Image (spheres, rainbow, N blue to C red):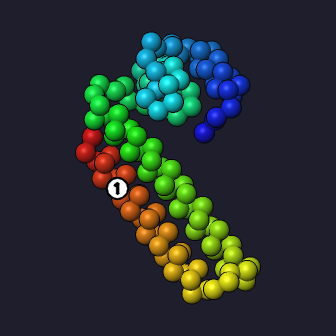
Amino acid sequence: MADNRNEIVRKMAELMRSGATMLDKSCPLCGAPLFKLRSGEIICPIHGPVRIVKSESEVVEILTDAVLDELEDFAARRIHEILTSLKSGDSPSEEQSLRSLMQWLRVLKYARATKKSSQKEQ
Ligand SMILES: [Zn+2]
């Protein structure tokens, strides 16, 4: 994800060059202008494909997806950290590390399952 302004401007220029048109709507997550690709797909220069929001509940839906993505990413990173400390033998307590490993795996599993079930409803 690009939080750098130059990167955003560069992406927007890239989209224009590829024939995308800038819309008068903005991304519900970051407020960046949305673009319509020649294929008809609507995308945010930062978040990629987005759906045009018609109601408040749709905003919540999109935000939920973003939060679940973030959670999944965070859990995966924690699992990686714990695994690294276990492998290197730096872990102060193996038992405790394994316990938190299991907890993060559960978080990851639920985040993925929740995302899948919300995608199925569409
Ligand atoms: Zn965005």
Q: How many marks?
A: 1
Residue lying at the far left of the rendered structure: 121
- Please give left or right for residue 63 compared with residue 75 in the image: left
Against 67, is 41 above or below?
above
Q: 35 or 98: which is nearer to us?
A: 98
Amino acid type, mark 1: Thr
Identify the residue position indicated by label 1 in the image. 114
Q: Residue at x 59, y 65 (%)?
A: 78
User: Where does the image place residue 16, in percent across and percent down from the top left?
Assistant: 59, 15
**Residue 37 in sight from this viewpoint:** no
SS class of the residue under badge 1?
helix
Q: Is the CB–ligand 1 distance for label 1 below 8 Å?
A: no
User: Where does the image place residue 55, in percent across and percent down from the top left?
Assistant: 28, 28
Against 75, is 30 above or below?
above
User: Where does the image place residue 61, in percent across and percent down from the top left?
Assistant: 33, 40
Estimate how packed mark 1 is, as few (under 14), some (14 to 19) or many (20 or more) residues with alpha carbons within 10 Å: some
Q: Residue at x 68, y 81 (%)?
A: 91
Quarter of the image with the C terminus in it: top left
Against 78, is 54 above or below?
above
- Please give left or right for residue 16 compared with residue 64 in the image: right
Q: Residue at x 38, y 29 (%)?
A: 51
User: Where does the image place residue 14, in percent across and percent down from the top left?
Assistant: 64, 21
